[in-house]
Image: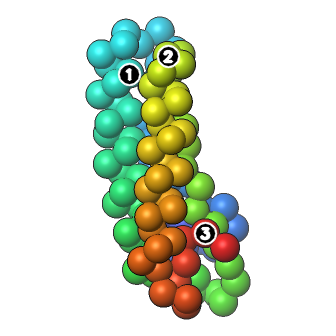
Amino acid sequence: MDIQRIIGADIIMAFDECTPGDADYTYAKKSLELTERWLDRCINRFGETESPYGFNQSLFPIVQGCVYPDLRKRAAENQMAMLLAALQWASPKRKCLR
């Protein structure tokens, strides 16, 4: 997060593990769980920091789940819930989404 802030990225991508397309379900599920933990950390760090250049920067999650529809649906739902929760505790000065 800090590096993306420092280089002045307009769109900051949350960390994720890019699962190989031929990964089995168990691997894809573990990878998604790792990505979700990283997203939680990214949201927290993003909320703790500000743009060093005075312009808005936006945090975007990456939906993972490989080729498994139930994992991709879970990823999308969980990411939305995490981002909405972050908005509830964010101060007016520091919002995760603008």
Per the image, label 2 sits on a secondary structure element best described as loop
Discs 1, 2 touching: Cβ within 8 Å:
yes
Residue at image coords 47%, 9%: 22
Per the image, label 3 sits on a secondary structure element best described as loop
Residue 97 circle label: 3
Discs 3, 1 touching: Cβ within 8 Å:
no
Q: Quadrant of residue 62?
A: top right
Tell me which label, 3 or 1, sits earlier in the chain. 1
On the image, the x and y values in percent for residue 21 come to: 52, 15
C-alpha span from label 3 to label 1: 28 Å
* Depth check, front residue: 13 or 61: 61
For the residue marked with disc 2, what is the amino acid?
A: Tyr
Residue 28 circle label: 1
Residue at image coords 36%, 13%: 25
C-alpha span from label 1 to label 2: 8 Å
On the image, the x and y values in percent for residue 97 come to: 61, 69
For the residue marked with disc 1, what is the amino acid?
A: Ala
Q: Is residue 95 above or below residue 14?
A: below
* Depth check, front residue: 64 or 71: 71
| Nearest-to-viewer mark from 1 and 2 | 2
For the residue marked with disc 3, what is the amino acid?
A: Leu
The residue that disc 2 covers is 68
